[in-house]
Each structure stands twice: as structure tokens, then as C-alpha cells.
Amino acid sequence: MKRRVAILISGRGSNMVALIEGARAADYPADIALVISNKPDAAGLARAQESGIKTIVIDSKPFGKDRAAFEAVMQNALDEHRIDLICLGGFMRLLTDDFVNRWTGRMLNIHPSLLPSFRGLDPHGQALRAGVKLSGATVHFVTPEMDAGPIVMQGAVTVRDDDTAETLAARVLEIEHRIYPAALRLVASGSTRIDGDICKIAATDCSNGTLTAPTTV
Ligand code: GAR
């Protein structure tokens, strides 16, 4: 049985589109059943509707600081649509520990850095200031700590001397769109197992490839 997935967005929803497109494969183990936005004007809403996906807006603004009340409405919608798994896709609202704990092992996030480096805001600026030669993106299970939690998949890109936060973000976004559907496939098919802080992956080819930057070595 395919797992029923809700994607939570606040903005343009390009990762949401990647997940919707990935889930079109006949053998994909998950169905994107619902998209929830906490912003009525999120550009991603129209893109979900074009794909025939049910969308719900739960405007977080009137709830102010009452995160629990906002989440109660969201939980109702998730229950109503019999959601098994949540994917956060640029969802810019902090979730309470209660909500996160209710979805332990069933909620994924994507962050545009190679975690645990560069959590939080401006990860690309942080990467450039640190002078790293490789950056990338991480799909991880959500835990109460922000941009932390067992890592399911990472993808790397090389960082160029002339990169700006914008050019690096654009290259990392391409990797995000590749790894998020792949990571959801692993989770939805039951190929992942959480062991403490670590996500173990069954039957994958973690070949002993290496990646260097610069590539002169
Ligand atoms: C993505 O780059 C995602 O990795 C990032 O927000 C962007 C959303 O873009 N998420 C975070 O920084 C989470 N800490 P999208 O709406 O086009 O998917």
C-alpha cells in the first residue's frame, strides 16, 4: 500500500513539485495526497493545484504566537486525509516539540547544506564565509532541534571561487530536487531504520566513491 504524504509549504514549492513529479512513477511507494500552506499567497499552491493535488491553506497569521492552536487545525487536516508521512518543503513556521514528537520518524525536512554544517538562516552565505569546497543539501527526519535529526540522504556540489550565495543556492537546489524524491522513496518503502540519532539504510549502494574539490587530486 502506498504511503499517503502531505507536503507543508510556505513559498514557491519547487521541492514540492519535485516530490509530486517523483511520485508519478508507477512503482513509487508514496502518493502525494495533500499540500498544506500556512501562507495564502504561497506560489506553490497554484503549482500543486495544476497537478491535481488537494491543497489546504491554514493561514498561520491569525494564530500569532499560539503555535499549538495552529497545529491543532493542521493535525485535524492531516487526520482527515489519513496522512502517513509529512514532507516539509520550505515550511517557514517553527513547529512545537509536541507536534514534532507526534510525527517522530514520519516527518522529513530538506535543508540546503551538508548538515550538521550551516544550520539555520543563510546556509549558503555561511558556507561561502567558511570557505568550504563542497556544499550541498540534506534530507533528514525532523526532531525538535532545528535542522537536525537522523540524516536520510545528502547530495554535494562543488563550491567555486566566484560563487555568490545566489549561484550556489541555484546549484544546490538542483541537487535538492534529486535527493528529496529519492529519500522519500527510501522512507516510504520501509528501507530506512532509525537507530538513535542515526538513520540506517537497507539495501542501498553506498559505493565507496569519493568526491574531491578541487578535482586535481
Ligand atoms: C529550499 O532551498 C529548502 O532547502 C529550504 O527552503 C527552500 C524552499 O524552496 N529550506 C530550509 O532552509 C529549511 N531550513 P522551495 O519552496 O522552492 O522548495
Image (tube, rainbow, N blue to C red):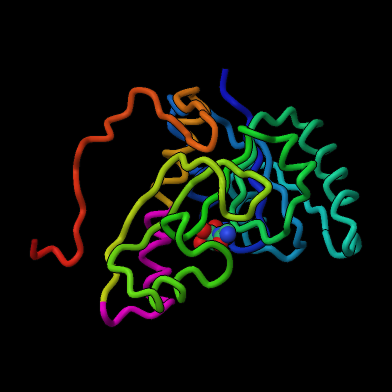
Query: Going 74% across and 51% down the picture, which residue do you hit?
Result: 95
- What x and y, as percent, mark residue 4? 63, 29
Q: Is residue 215 magenta?
A: no
Q: Position of residue 12 (x, y in %)?
A: 59, 63
Answer whether residue 171 is magenta in the image: yes
- Residue at the farthest front position: 196
Point out residue 69 in the picture as x, y percentages from the top left corner.
Answer: 90, 50
Relative to residue 19, is residue 195 depicted above or below? above
Which corner quadrant holds the C terminus? bottom left
Question: For the point 36% across and 65% down, which residue is it?
Answer: 171
Q: Residue furthest top?
A: 1
Left or right? Give the position of 106 relative to 182: right
Left or right side of 67 for 160: left
**Nearest to the observer: residue 9 or residue 49:** 9
Q: Nearer the viewer, residue 48 or 2?
A: 2
> Residue drawn at (57%, 17%), measured in percent from left and top?
1
- Position in image of residue 154 (x %, y %): 39, 48
- Secondary structure predominantly adopted by residues drawn in magenta: helix
Picture quadrant where residue 160 is located? bottom left
Q: Residue furthest left?
A: 216
**Considering depth in this image, is 208 or 195 the residue closer to the camera?**
195
Up-down relation of residue 186 to residue 133 (above or below): above
Left/right placement of residue 8 relative to residue 67 reads left
Name the image quarter holding residue 183: top left
Task: Tell how many labels.
Answer: 0
Residue visible at 47% across and 28% down in the picture? 192
Q: Quadrant of ligand 1?
A: bottom right
What residue range appears in magenta? 161-176
Q: Is residue 65 above or below residue 153?
A: below
